[in-house]
Image: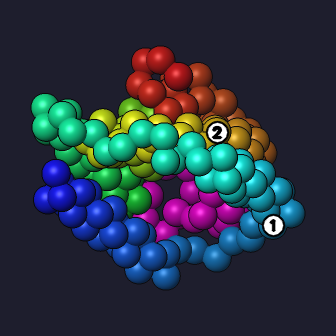
Amino acid sequence: MRAIEFVFAVAWAAFWLYWLVAAFSMKRGHLPWARDLRIRAVLIVIVIVLVHFGVFRAVGPNTDLWLAGPGLVLLALGLGLAIWARLHIGRNWGTPMTQKDEPELVTSGPYHLVRHPIYSGILVAGIGTAMALSWLWLIAVALAGFYFIYSATVEERYMTEQFPDAYPVYKRSTKMLVPFLF
Protein backbone atom coordinates (compact mmCIF):
# COMPACT_ATOMS: atom_id res chain seq x y z
CA MET A 1 0.00 0.00 0.00
CA ARG A 2 2.97 2.34 0.51
CA ALA A 3 3.55 2.49 -3.27
CA ILE A 4 -0.01 3.74 -3.81
CA GLU A 5 0.43 6.41 -1.14
CA PHE A 6 3.68 7.47 -2.84
CA VAL A 7 1.98 7.75 -6.25
CA PHE A 8 -0.77 9.94 -4.79
CA ALA A 9 1.73 12.11 -2.91
CA VAL A 10 3.82 12.64 -6.05
CA ALA A 11 0.74 13.41 -8.17
CA TRP A 12 -0.59 15.99 -5.71
CA ALA A 13 2.88 17.53 -5.20
CA ALA A 14 3.42 17.84 -8.96
CA PHE A 15 -0.04 19.37 -9.37
CA TRP A 16 0.50 21.99 -6.67
CA LEU A 17 4.01 22.77 -7.95
CA TYR A 18 2.56 23.36 -11.44
CA TRP A 19 -0.18 25.50 -9.88
CA LEU A 20 2.37 27.64 -8.05
CA VAL A 21 4.54 28.15 -11.14
CA ALA A 22 1.51 28.89 -13.36
CA ALA A 23 0.32 31.56 -10.91
CA PHE A 24 3.11 33.86 -12.10
CA SER A 25 1.45 34.23 -15.52
CA MET A 26 -1.95 35.54 -14.46
CA LYS A 27 -3.40 38.98 -15.14
CA ARG A 28 -3.44 41.64 -12.48
CA GLY A 29 -6.45 41.71 -10.24
CA HIS A 30 -7.51 42.31 -6.69
CA LEU A 31 -9.04 40.17 -4.00
CA PRO A 32 -11.49 41.35 -1.36
CA TRP A 33 -9.19 39.99 1.38
CA ALA A 34 -11.51 40.37 4.35
CA ARG A 35 -14.15 38.11 2.78
CA ASP A 36 -11.63 35.48 1.70
CA LEU A 37 -9.83 35.44 5.04
CA ARG A 38 -13.07 34.95 7.00
CA ILE A 39 -14.08 31.82 5.10
CA ARG A 40 -10.54 30.41 5.23
CA ALA A 41 -10.37 31.09 8.98
CA VAL A 42 -13.62 29.18 9.54
CA LEU A 43 -12.29 26.20 7.57
CA ILE A 44 -9.01 26.23 9.51
CA VAL A 45 -10.89 26.28 12.83
CA ILE A 46 -12.99 23.29 11.70
CA VAL A 47 -9.85 21.34 10.81
CA ILE A 48 -8.20 22.20 14.14
CA VAL A 49 -11.29 21.04 16.05
CA LEU A 50 -11.39 17.77 14.07
CA VAL A 51 -7.70 17.13 14.73
CA HIS A 52 -8.11 18.01 18.42
CA PHE A 53 -10.89 15.47 18.85
CA GLY A 54 -8.86 12.79 17.07
CA VAL A 55 -11.14 12.32 14.09
CA PHE A 56 -8.19 11.56 11.84
CA ARG A 57 -6.95 8.79 14.16
CA ALA A 58 -10.25 6.94 14.13
CA VAL A 59 -9.80 5.11 10.83
CA GLY A 60 -6.69 3.62 9.31
CA PRO A 61 -5.77 3.71 5.64
CA ASN A 62 -7.84 1.78 3.11
CA THR A 63 -6.48 -1.71 2.51
CA ASP A 64 -8.71 -2.67 -0.39
CA LEU A 65 -6.54 -2.67 -3.50
CA TRP A 66 -9.68 -2.78 -5.67
CA LEU A 67 -10.40 0.78 -4.55
CA ALA A 68 -6.91 1.98 -5.43
CA GLY A 69 -7.41 1.55 -9.19
CA PRO A 70 -10.64 3.56 -9.50
CA GLY A 71 -9.22 6.06 -7.01
CA LEU A 72 -6.16 6.54 -9.18
CA VAL A 73 -8.37 6.98 -12.26
CA LEU A 74 -10.44 9.65 -10.47
CA LEU A 75 -7.26 11.37 -9.31
CA ALA A 76 -5.91 11.46 -12.87
CA LEU A 77 -9.23 12.60 -14.38
CA GLY A 78 -9.73 15.27 -11.73
CA LEU A 79 -6.23 16.70 -11.89
CA GLY A 80 -6.36 16.47 -15.68
CA LEU A 81 -9.62 18.46 -15.78
CA ALA A 82 -8.22 21.11 -13.43
CA ILE A 83 -5.02 21.46 -15.47
CA TRP A 84 -6.94 21.55 -18.78
CA ALA A 85 -9.18 24.29 -17.36
CA ARG A 86 -6.19 26.23 -16.04
CA LEU A 87 -4.43 26.04 -19.41
CA HIS A 88 -7.62 26.96 -21.26
CA ILE A 89 -8.43 30.02 -19.16
CA GLY A 90 -4.83 31.20 -19.48
CA ARG A 91 -3.96 34.54 -17.92
CA ASN A 92 -7.58 35.04 -16.84
CA TRP A 93 -7.06 32.55 -14.01
CA GLY A 94 -6.73 33.79 -10.45
CA THR A 95 -7.01 32.63 -6.89
CA PRO A 96 -10.59 32.08 -5.70
CA MET A 97 -12.70 35.24 -5.73
CA THR A 98 -10.06 37.37 -7.50
CA GLN A 99 -11.48 40.23 -9.51
CA LYS A 100 -9.44 40.81 -12.69
CA ASP A 101 -8.71 44.31 -13.98
CA GLU A 102 -9.51 43.28 -17.57
CA PRO A 103 -11.78 40.20 -17.23
CA GLU A 104 -12.70 37.99 -20.17
CA LEU A 105 -15.59 35.55 -20.22
CA VAL A 106 -14.31 32.08 -21.15
CA THR A 107 -17.09 29.60 -22.03
CA SER A 108 -15.31 27.12 -24.29
CA GLY A 109 -13.29 23.97 -23.62
CA PRO A 110 -13.85 22.65 -20.09
CA TYR A 111 -15.87 25.79 -19.32
CA HIS A 112 -18.47 24.48 -21.75
CA LEU A 113 -18.95 21.43 -19.46
CA VAL A 114 -19.17 23.30 -16.13
CA ARG A 115 -18.69 26.91 -15.07
CA HIS A 116 -15.97 26.04 -12.53
CA PRO A 117 -14.01 23.07 -13.92
CA ILE A 118 -10.94 23.74 -11.79
CA TYR A 119 -13.00 23.34 -8.63
CA SER A 120 -14.72 20.28 -10.09
CA GLY A 121 -11.41 18.68 -11.02
CA ILE A 122 -9.86 19.20 -7.59
CA LEU A 123 -12.97 17.73 -5.92
CA VAL A 124 -12.95 14.66 -8.21
CA ALA A 125 -9.24 14.16 -7.50
CA GLY A 126 -9.96 14.45 -3.77
CA ILE A 127 -12.68 11.80 -4.00
CA GLY A 128 -10.25 9.53 -5.84
CA THR A 129 -7.69 10.08 -3.10
CA ALA A 130 -10.27 9.20 -0.45
CA MET A 131 -11.21 6.01 -2.28
CA ALA A 132 -7.63 4.84 -2.60
CA LEU A 133 -6.05 6.00 0.64
CA SER A 134 -8.51 6.82 3.41
CA TRP A 135 -12.15 7.80 3.58
CA LEU A 136 -11.08 10.57 5.97
CA TRP A 137 -10.02 12.48 2.86
CA LEU A 138 -13.75 13.03 2.34
CA ILE A 139 -13.62 15.52 5.21
CA ALA A 140 -11.08 17.57 3.25
CA VAL A 141 -13.16 17.16 0.08
CA ALA A 142 -16.30 18.35 1.90
CA LEU A 143 -14.50 21.39 3.34
CA ALA A 144 -13.03 22.21 -0.08
CA GLY A 145 -16.48 21.73 -1.60
CA PHE A 146 -18.04 24.25 0.77
CA TYR A 147 -15.23 26.70 0.07
CA PHE A 148 -15.50 26.22 -3.69
CA ILE A 149 -19.28 26.70 -3.72
CA TYR A 150 -18.89 29.87 -1.67
CA SER A 151 -16.07 31.11 -3.95
CA ALA A 152 -18.03 30.23 -7.09
CA THR A 153 -21.07 32.13 -5.83
CA VAL A 154 -18.97 35.24 -5.12
CA GLU A 155 -17.18 34.94 -8.47
CA GLU A 156 -20.47 34.57 -10.32
CA ARG A 157 -21.86 37.75 -8.79
CA TYR A 158 -18.78 39.58 -10.03
CA MET A 159 -19.00 37.99 -13.49
CA THR A 160 -22.68 38.95 -13.74
CA GLU A 161 -21.72 42.56 -12.99
CA GLN A 162 -18.91 42.47 -15.57
CA PHE A 163 -20.91 40.67 -18.29
CA PRO A 164 -24.58 41.53 -17.62
CA ASP A 165 -25.78 40.25 -21.00
CA ALA A 166 -23.56 37.22 -21.59
CA TYR A 167 -23.03 35.71 -18.13
CA PRO A 168 -26.68 35.03 -17.23
CA VAL A 169 -27.11 33.20 -20.55
CA TYR A 170 -23.96 31.14 -19.89
CA LYS A 171 -25.13 30.43 -16.33
CA ARG A 172 -28.48 29.10 -17.56
CA SER A 173 -26.84 26.82 -20.13
CA THR A 174 -23.99 25.38 -18.02
CA LYS A 175 -24.05 23.80 -14.55
CA MET A 176 -21.79 25.09 -11.79
CA LEU A 177 -19.73 22.01 -10.81
CA VAL A 178 -21.31 18.77 -12.07
CA PRO A 179 -22.39 18.49 -15.72
CA PHE A 180 -26.17 18.11 -16.13
CA LEU A 181 -26.74 18.11 -12.33
CA PHE A 182 -25.33 21.01 -10.29
Q: For the residue marked with disc 2, what is the amino acid?
A: Phe
Report the predominant secondary structure element of the magenta stretch: loop
* Magenta residue span: 89-109
Residue that numbered label 1 is attached to: 33
Q: Compared with residue 34, is residue 24 higher up or lower down, i.e. above or below?
A: below
User: At 53% across and 63% down in the image, what residue appears?
Assistant: 92
Question: Residue 4: which quarter of the image?
Answer: bottom left
> Residue 133 appears at what percent x and percent y?
30, 45
Query: Which secondary structure lies at badge 2?
Result: helix
Membership of 84 in magenta stretch: no
The CA distance from mark 1 to mark 2 is 18 Å
Q: Which sits in the foreground, 152 or 147? A: 147
Q: Secondary structure at mark 1?
A: helix
Residue 110 visible, this orientation: no
Q: Decide if residue 3 is on the left or right side of residue 161.
A: left
Task: Kindly check if marks 1 and 2 are in contact, taking CB atoms under 8 A apart as contact.
Answer: no
Given the image, on which type of amino acid does mark 1 rest? Trp
User: Badge 2 is on which residue?
Assistant: 146
